[in-house]
Structures are given as C-alpha cells and as structure tokens.
Image (cartoon, rainbow, N blue to C red):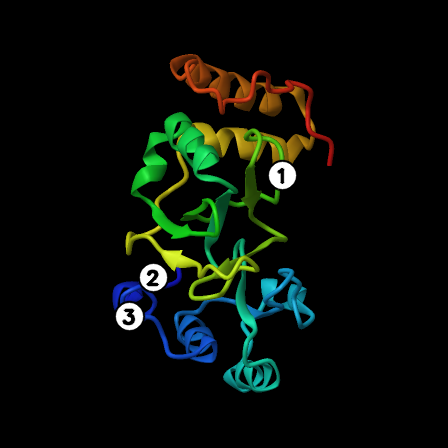
Amino acid sequence: MNSTSGLATDETPDDEPLTLSDAALTYLRRGWPIFAVDRGGKKPLVEWKRYQDRLPIEKEVKAWWQKWPQANVGMATGHLSGFVVVDCDSEEAATRFVEAYPEAETTLQVQTDRGRHFYFQHEEGVRNNSSLLGPGIDVRGEGGFVILPPSIHSSGEPYKWLNQNEPQPMPDTLKEILSDHSKECGSDHSQVAAAERLHRCAAKNAESSDWPEEIDPEPHRC
C-alpha cells in the first residue's frame, strides 16, 4: 500500500499546496501514479495508460506542469496506486452507498463538486464499472483514474480531502459483487446481488423522494 501519511498537513482544505505542481510532486513522492489532466473536461493531457504500470519520473512531472501550470492532477487507480475508488456523483448517491456499505464511512474520502470519492485498498481484478452499484455510483479500478485534491472542478469548486483516514479494505459484500462482475462481466449474479442490496436499503428510506423508484436488475454488459 502506498503512503497516505501527511494528507492533513499537505493537502487538506486548511493547508493546501501553493500550486498544483507542488501537489503533483508530493503525490509522486508517496508513490502515486499521477499525471496531468485538463481542468475543463477531465481529459488526460498525456498518454496516461503507461502510468498504470510505472510511475512517472520527477522530470516528467515538472515538465507537465511547466507546460500546463493550471492542469489538474489525475491518478491511475488499480494495482500500482493500490486503490479502488467508488465515485458517487451526488451526496444522495453517497448516502445510499454508505447505507448499503456502512464500513465506507471510515475510509479515506474526497469531496468532489457534488458528491464524494471513497478510497479502498486495491483488490485484484476489480475494474471500472459505471452501473453495477446503482444510479450515480461508479467504480474506478484497473484501467481507470480519478482527480486528486486540490484540483479544480469545471464548476470552479476544488476537490478536498474530507479526512486523513487510511484506505480501508473493501467490504466483503462489495468485494464479492465487484469481483464476480469482473470475472463474469455481465453475469446475472453480480448485478442482481448489487440491486438486491440497494433495494433493501431503499426499503429503509422509502420516504425519500430522491430514491430511484426502480433499479434495473438486468446485467450490465461490458
């Protein structure tokens, strides 16, 4: 597991680096596979997929931010970073996710424009997924990337660390669902298991008008 120590002094909202370049170099020194990303559209500014398997060198990072001083900081998820990230695109989606998997509340988290990122320890074989866990909840694993604080969202809001917790192991039920899906890619078992768990949480919150009336149990196709 790569280091998450120092978040409280280096990147929290109360004491953020002076520049995005400073932040990028700090993350690199922790062993995180970072790269430059366009601020407006989350588009990598470099051929980023090579950084799923190797870290950039400091010379590369300095050159990127010299060329694009306002670039955001992206990080490849998966085995090299040691992270799987669950991306909830709204606070309502984040609440649903925590209700389904209460252990998520104690893991490392980032505030995005409208939602949250939940950082978990890497699990072998967990890949990206954009629908398995329900509306507004994506998974970033092997082959994916996330945006790191103190990057600026296109809305103008900064990404912020919400805590300095260590990334926790993925909850067993979540790991089973995501691992089954990665192995079988579209199997009924993983999709229905996720849908059933979310429906159980929905039943506890039936009074919420924001909850989707129906979650499609049909399997996600890769």
Asked which quadrant contains residue 104, the reply is top left
The residue where tag 3 is placed is 15
Give the percent coordinates (x, y) of residue 202: 45, 17
Camera-side mark, 2 or 3: 3
- The mark that comes first in sequence, 2 or 3, is 2
Give the percent coordinates (x, y) of residue 35: 57, 70
Label 1: few (<14), some (14–19) or many (≥20) C-alpha neighbours in 10 Å: some
Pick whichever, 220 or 124, lies toward us. 220
Please name the amino acid that badge 1 sits on.
Ser
Relative to 219, is 110 above or below?
A: below
On screen, residue 158 versus residue 195, left or right, reads left
Pick whichever, 103 or 203, lies toward us. 203
Residue at point 66%, 63% (across, down): 43
Quadrant where the C terminus sits is top right
Quote the CA–CA distance across marks 2 and 1: 26 Å
On screen, residue 133 versus residue 161, left or right, reads right
The tag on residue 130 is: 1
Label 3: few (<14), some (14–19) or many (≥20) C-alpha neighbours in 10 Å: few
Residue at point 56%, 48% (across, down): 141
Quote the CA–CA distance across marks 1 and 3: 33 Å
Label 2: few (<14), some (14–19) or many (≥20) C-alpha neighbours in 10 Å: some
- The mark that comes first in sequence, 1 or 3, is 3
The tag on residue 4 is: 2
Please name the amino acid that badge 3 sits on.
Asp
SS for callout 1: loop
- The mark that comes first in sequence, 2 or 1, is 2
Give the percent coordinates (x, y) of residue 179: 55, 35
Asked which quadrant contains residue 213, the reply is top right
Relative to 141, is 151 above or below?
A: below
